[in-house]
Image (spheres, rainbow, N blue to C red):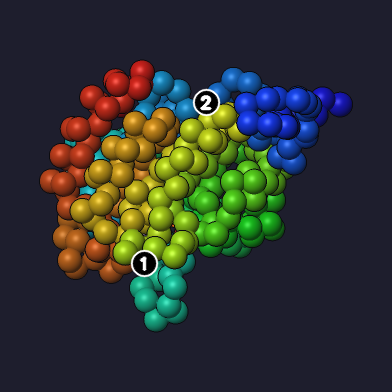
């Protein structure tokens, strides 16, 4: 059996490599050694993640109404985005917060897909809802809170649909890659990883965007890497700068929360870009992508 391995250098004195040996990494299928070429995920025909083209994904945190979702979908398509996000089932910190429209939210996402030709990314919160979400989603999101929900990961591994696996708020890269390994080991090779900020001592932002994980993951794994600057910062003025930084760092995609009226949003308004702000961000990305050998 070929074991995924990485070169491990033991340095005796500064600058002196005395021993180089292969040590196995625990995430065998996810490792770059197992699969040296980048994995290219086809979300739907013509919409790929992991190639030279950086994938722009936009949409509201939660689907709230037909008017809200269609406005966001139109803005996403017009900005060159090809994937519409929107939660129908929302994992909220408080049980008293808006929990999403559920099945009606899925129906509206399906309508937006037909109307605007966008692919859909939306979250499956539990095993029970996975099949229902998979009927509408082109890309199934597994949220940060569920990164180590192993029964959900196993169930996602049995699907023939791409999975966007968000990083747990306190997960190391190894724990995150091992979570992805559950999906891969189940037979589903279409896994993308989404950095959405981790919990640190810093309280000025909702989370801390670990941008160095992008080039690190590129070295460790063949799986595409997405950055969500919205949950990573929690604050709309920081979203566009961090989205640009993500593209510069080599992210394969960015996932951005937008809302036609952020102040009235039922969830995550403070981190949502208005539609004109999203258009402005999208217009700035091609130049940055070009600087790192990509396009949008
Ligand atoms: C979301 O994308 O709306 C979401 C809840 O994200 P996370 O799981 O990263 O908190
Ligand atoms: Mn959100």
Under tag 1, what secondary structure?
A: loop
**Residue 194 appears at what percent x and percent y?**
47, 45
Residue nearest the observer in this picture, 122 or 136: 122
290 shown above or below 129: above
Which label number is shown at residue 203? 1
Instruction: Quarter of the image for the N terminus: give it.
Output: top right
Residue 106, percent from left and from top:
41, 55
Is 169 situated left or right of 265 in this image?
right
Above or below 156: residue 39: above
Q: Nearer the viewer, residue 159 or 206?
A: 206
Q: Quadrant of the C terminus?
A: top left
Question: Which residue does the image show at 34% across and 49% down from the upper left?
Answer: 229
Left or right placement of residue 113 versus residue 22 in this view: left
Which residue matches tag 2? 40
Q: Residue at x 51, y 50 (%)?
A: 166
Q: From this viewpoint, which residue is outermost toward the front?
A: 13
Is residue 25 placed above or below 256 in the rendered structure? above
Report the residue at 59% width, 20% height from top: 37
């Amino acid at each position: 059996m070929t074991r995924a391995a990485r070169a491990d250098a033991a340095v005796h004195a500064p600058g002196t490599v005395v021993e180089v040996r292969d040590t196995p990494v625990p995430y065998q299928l996810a490792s770059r050694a197992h699969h040296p070429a980048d994995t290219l995920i086809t979300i739907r025909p013509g919409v790929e993640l992991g190639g030279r083209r950086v994938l722009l994904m936009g949409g509201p945190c939660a689907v709230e109404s037909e008017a809200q979702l269609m406005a966001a979908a139109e803005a996403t398509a017009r900005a060159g985005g090809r994937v519409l996000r929107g939660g129908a089932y929302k994992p909220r910190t408080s049980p008293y917060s808006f929990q999403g429209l559920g099945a009606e939210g899925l129906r509206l996402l399906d309508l937006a897909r037909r109307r605007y030709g966008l692919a859909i990314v939306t979250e499956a919160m539990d095993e029970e809802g996975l099949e229902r979400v998979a009927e509408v989603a082109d890309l199934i999101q597994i949220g940060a809170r569920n990164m180590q929900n192993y029964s959900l990961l196993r169930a996602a591994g049995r699907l023939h649909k791409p999975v966007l696996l968000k990083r747990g708020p306190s997960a190391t890269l190894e724990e995150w890659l091992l979570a992805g390994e559950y999906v891969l080991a189940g037979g589903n090779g279409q896994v993308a990883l989404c950095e959405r900020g981790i919990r640190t001592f810093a309280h000025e932002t909702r989370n801390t965007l670990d941008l160095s994980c992008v080039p690190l993951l590129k070295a460790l794994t063949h799986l595409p890497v997405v950055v969500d600057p919205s949950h990573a910062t929690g604050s709309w003025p920081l979203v566009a700068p961090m989205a640009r930084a993500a593209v510069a760092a080599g992210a394969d995609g960015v996932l951005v929360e937008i809302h036609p009226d952020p102040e009235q949003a039922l969830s995550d308004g403070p981190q949502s870009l208005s539609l004109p702000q999203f258009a402005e961000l999208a217009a700035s990305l091609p130049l940055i992508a070009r600087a790192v050998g990509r396009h949008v």
